[in-house]
Amino acid sequence: MTIRHPLPLIAIPADVREVGIHPFHIVGEKYILGVTKGAEALPVLLPSLGDELDRKDLIERIDGILFTGSPSNVEPHHYEGPSSRPGTMHDPQRDSTTLPLIREAIEAGVPILCICRGIQELNVALGGTLHQHVEEVPGLMNHRADLSKSREVQYAPTHKVTLEPGGVLAEFWPDTAVMVNSLHGQGIDRLAAGLAIEARAPDGLIEAVHVIDAPAFAIGVQWHPEWKVTENAFSMALFGAFGEAARARAARRQVSRPSPARRRLLQARRARS
């Protein structure tokens, strides 16, 4: 008889946006499909509740976390940066949820994958800083997408990233360079002390990192591997590695907790004593 193991649970923290006159907690479909098709896991959409979220309880129940991209930017007071320009989109509820959650997930050995805004959150959460306008930094190119173009054009590969020899990405990808898309206005300035560089763009901008000495998978990338994930071999390898780490955690959680029948038996014994 084949034993069917439950899919690992991967939480995806939501953005908070106003739709009409009401705030909604939302997650882009491409991230959900990245988890289901790329990581072969069950996505759990996580409301951005800040300190109202019981992070310890959450961490005990999940097998991974995907920190997504977003049109909003991390508020600069989190890294002692200058005030944002007027009109910059922020999401303080997401900041108050994801920044402490990143730190606690790493410490607890929960696998994490951080994409676009997510890699910026990872860097800020661990003490790094951000360029607020990459295109204005001398020597760096414009990494933003042309929003007047179709989604297909915006998410098409635009430049190479060079993988660091001996890095985590190099462990599951044989080539030294990968073509990626580019849809971001902000980027890593000062790298957090707890991070190591995994890849750079041609202009030298940091495009991928891993958490040094993390007990589980902990990778951040500046591009969007979730876009049409099944059509890109490198994206599938990245999400596949993330999914494998989540399955390993799920297996450990399954062993460490009693089955429902065992829990009922223990409860009955306690009731009789």
Image: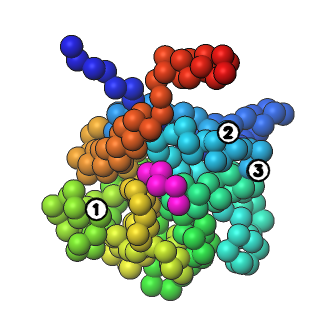
Q: Give the residue number, with chain letter if any, for mark 2.
A: 47
Residue type at mark 2 is Pro
Q: Is residue 218 above or below residue 254?
A: below
Q: How far apart in space, not on screen, are marks 2 and 1 (Cα)?
A: 30 Å
Please, which residue is most extreme toward the left here?
Answer: 174
Residue type at mark 3 is Asp
Residue beneath the point at 68% across and 51% down: 97
- Callout 3: SS: helix
- Callout 2: SS: loop
Colour theme = rainbow
Residues at circles 3 and 1 in contact by the CB criterion of under 8 Å = no
Q: Is residue 159 above or below residue 243?
A: below
- State the quadrant of the N terminus: top left
Determine if the magenta segment contains residue 148.
Answer: no
Q: Is residue 215 above or below residue 259?
A: below
Region in magenta: 107-114
- Residue 51 marker: 3
Q: Earlier in the sequence, mark 2 or mark 1?
A: 2
Residue type at mark 1 is Leu
Residue 128 sits in quarter = bottom right
Determine if the magenta segment contains residue 112.
Answer: yes
- Residue 169 marker: 1
